[in-house]
Image (tube, rainbow, N blue to C red):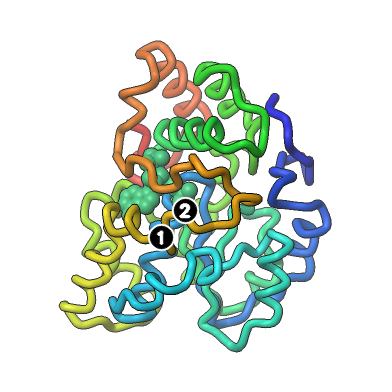
Amino acid sequence: MAEGFLWYAGIPFPTKFCKTEDIRAAHEQFVVKDKDIITVTYPRSGTNWMIEILCLILSKGDPEWIRSVPMWERCLSIESELGSKIIRDMKEGPRLLTSHLPFQLFPKSFLTSKAKVIYVLRNPKDVLVSRYYFICQSKFMKNPESLQQYDEWFIQGNVAYGSWFAHVLGWMSMRESKSVLVLSYEALKKDTRSTVEKICQFLGKKLEPEELDLVVENSSFQAMKENKMSNYSSMDRNYISANVEMIRKGMVGDWKNHLTVAQAEAFDKIFQEKMAGFPPELLPCD
Ligand code: A3P
């Protein structure tokens, strides 16, 4: 089991970013407003990419905002101490918010609001590899000894925000709701433009074709990697270590470069057991 966690409702959270009272406040007291747009993910599933896209949709593709204001000020985390304080003082929406909370700990007030959630999921084997590199680069918690060890922690759910399987199953239970749009990182990669159009439709935003082009262009992997306001290179080093690559490879199927055949097969077996009954086209694991 990795170190650097607090446990809340049976789920490990990173002590560096969350406190018990913040998670409880997020769940029980946080007031979601009708115009809120909330990106929800299991970590390393494409959170920052979605936030960049949403910022660009709101500014009709104009990159001025994303190039002048850091990502973490444009979109605040519901469950972080700092985020929740600033959110309380924000003016009427649309407020861009983000969360890694599992559905059962998400603000209760969401269910009686008209707010919109975009849930981004990603092939768990790519999430596993992406998280492994992120954790090894950051200094916030004890590093796993190897990818094999992290694989074991990940499958057991002994990692920050708990089990990928439980997180995805919880949020997938909301996929028929008009207030929740479930998207995959893979679909976003395969056809970014039409996925962005789908997001616009969900949010009731009408963009001109050239504005859509700008959203796609300014949220590309390369554009985000080069943008100091989006690549976290300008974030306070108390929160992120200098060598962390938030925007790392941006590939679909990078797990093939890291997991052995035996590791991948063992993972797939557990995936089949835990996700039985879900349409495979909704849950990428190839
Ligand atoms: P990799 O580590 O596989 O490269 P999150 O924002 O939830 O932490 O997710 C991080 C993952 O999204 C990283 O994956 C990162 O490189 C990828 N990512 C970030 N911006 C992206 C973009 N514009 N296009 C494709 N992938 C992107």
Q: Quadrant of the N terminus?
A: top right
Q: Earlier in the sequence, mark 1 or mark 2?
A: 1
Residue beneath the point at 39% across and 47% down: 247
User: Would residue 123 be found to the left or right of residue 111 on screen?
Assistant: left
- In the image, residue 115 sits, relative to residue 128, either above or below, namely below
Return the residue found at the far right.
21
- The x, y position of residue 18, in whole percent, is 73, 52
Residue beneath the point at 49% across and 40% down: 243
- The x, y position of residue 275, in whole percent, is 49, 35
Q: Which mark is residue 233?
A: 2
Query: Tag 1: residue type?
Result: Lys
Return the residue found at the far left.
210
Quarter location, residue 159: top right
User: What is the crowding at mark 1: few (fewer than 14 residues within 10 Å), some, or many (at least 20)?
Assistant: some
Label 1 vs label 2: CA separation? Answer: 6 Å
User: Would residue 175 be found to the left or right of residue 199 on screen?
Assistant: right
Q: Which residue is mark 1?
A: 228
Residue beneath the point at 55% across and 70% down: 73
Asked whether the residues under the numbered discs 1 and 2 touch, taking CB atoms below 8 Å apart as contact, a structural biologist would say yes
User: Would residue 232 be found to the left or right of residue 61 on screen?
Assistant: right
From the viewer's side, name the closer residue of 245 and 57.
Answer: 245
From the viewer's side, name the closer residue of 182 and 64.
Answer: 64
Q: Which mark is residue 71?
A: none
Query: Tag 2: residue type?
Result: Ser
Quarter location, residue 206: bottom left
